[in-house]
Amino acid sequence: MSHPAAIQFHAPDLEALPQLSGRIALLFDGEKPTSLAARRLNKLTRGALARAMGSEAAQRLKPGEALDLAFPAGLAAEALQLVRLPRRASVADARKAGASVARALTASGVTLITETHPQTAEIAFGLALRAYDFSPHKSKPPAALGPVVIATANPEAVAAAASPMAAVAEGVFFTRDLVNEPANILTTHDFAARLAAMQELGLDVEILEEDQLARLGMNALLGVGMGSESPSKVVVMQWHGGPKDQPPFALVGKGVVFDTGGISIKPAGGMEDMTMDMGGAATVAGVMRSLALRGAKANVVGLVGIVENMPDGRAQRPGDVVRSMKGDTIEVINTDAEGRLVLADVLWYAQDRFKPSGMINLATLTGAIIVALGHENTGVFSNNDALCNAFLKAAEAEGEGAWRMPMGQAYDGKLKSRIADMVNSCGRDGGSITAAQFLRRFVKEETPWCHLDIAGTALLKSDSTLAPKGATGWGVMALNRLIRDRYEAK
Ligand code: BES
Ligand code: MN
Ligand code: ZN
């Protein structure tokens, strides 16, 4: 629904430069026009290109930034965009350069000349990610973006390198579409149906309905959905790309399609943002989509708990006690601390059924993580240094901010309940950490596990380098890389 213009890779055609319509984007690294295409464009514009490159504005550009020469004399193109990028650019700068081209892209399209730049596939990836747009609910959507042609000296090699990246971009878009969608459209039923549609890609998708969840004993999860007209569901997505005997890696997501807080209702201001409270589940789904599209050689299972947290005559009350699938009882102090109730049962089910080699869960779990880390970093909690460090390394390589938070017995101690085995909420202090300690009670000692609190990173109020404002798809790239580097048969 929101797919940016398809990108084609061609060899540069110097003869065609004067007649090219749309925009022309050209890499430069702070030098004079040295490449073949740049020299030709400089001649056609009678030296305007060289003057622009030497200008103070061009010299002040940081790697990845760009400036426009509008309606350049001597060219049919509507603009000549200079994109500053050194030859030995970092991956992040290369993606940023692509994003700069995407931000200026219009219906008439662009020819981006990268010639022999070694990071051309990364440039294309950044362009695709930033060209994303979500406007299915606009009566007058923006005009579709025109074609993108990347003129590179090695079109076959670049296209081959770009192909798995396009699969990852598709996963990111899937996550963003789900997170951006409002809750009257993305009901629990609609969400599950969109996941089931991924069977076409070779994923095994099962939808567990309320009666099955009750038989499994998932009362912590079911309690959250009792006030909603939309039935609670657990969706299991399996990708079998690895050896038969390889135990799967598990991804688990919080999928609260809307979080009013329930009977512990939230204040009205900003409540509309709680349409993104299924961001963890959407990220799991986006990763599964990427793995399927690129044919990943690993066994991975994605499990998501899909519920809606509403106040109602049938809703769960503060003070209620529920028995989780694990068997531990939980006193529900605050019905707004619902994500951990959902995850408790899905985490347990994931381990019980799949005996995974490791497990990562994602959740828009606490406002407190935004107080601690702002919107720049996801909070990472773990019981296993090796898995945690591998994840942090993957996130760093993808430019997705992630910061490890502490855990410990002293925090766990705060979960004591007078009448049950634990409470679901114990005050503001260290709120993200006590939430993580709660989850940890449902993780077996022997399961390497990370919890990613994405409350601050799943949705942004302003544009970022690789996404327009709104859903970011944070984590799809890092998790895809972690699976590629750590679990795929080489
Ligand atoms: N979904 C919210 C957390 C959240 C807050 C996500 C802001 C995104 C942006 C979660 O279910 C919640 O309500 N958490 C409470 C926990 C508290 C009641 C212990 C919170 O953070 O206030
Ligand atoms: Mn809540
Ligand atoms: Zn929530």
Image (cartoon, grey):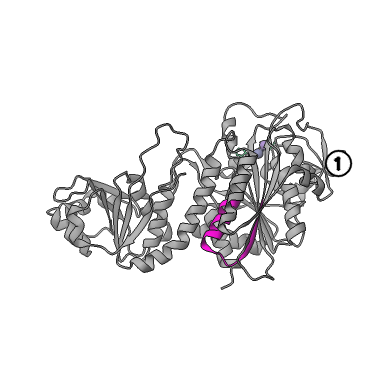
Asked which quadrant contains residue 178, the reply is top right
**What kind of element bears circle 1?**
loop
Asked which quadrant contains residue 153, the reply is bottom left
Q: Is residue 36 visible?
A: yes
What residue is rendered at 51% in x and 51% in y? 172
Asked which quadrant contains residue 431, the reply is top right
The quarter of the rendering in which ligand 1 is drawn is: top right
Residue receiving disc 1: 420
Comparing 31 with 182, the one in front is 182
Comparing 50 with 470, the one in front is 470
Q: Is residue 426 magenta?
A: no
What residue is rendered at 53% in x and 49% in y? 474
Q: Position of residue 76 (x, y in %)?
A: 18, 49
Q: Is residue 393 above or below residue 346?
A: below
Q: Position of residue 371 (x, y in %)?
A: 59, 40
**Furthest-left residue in this view:** 46
Residues shaded magenta: 284-303
Q: Is residue 286 magenta?
A: yes
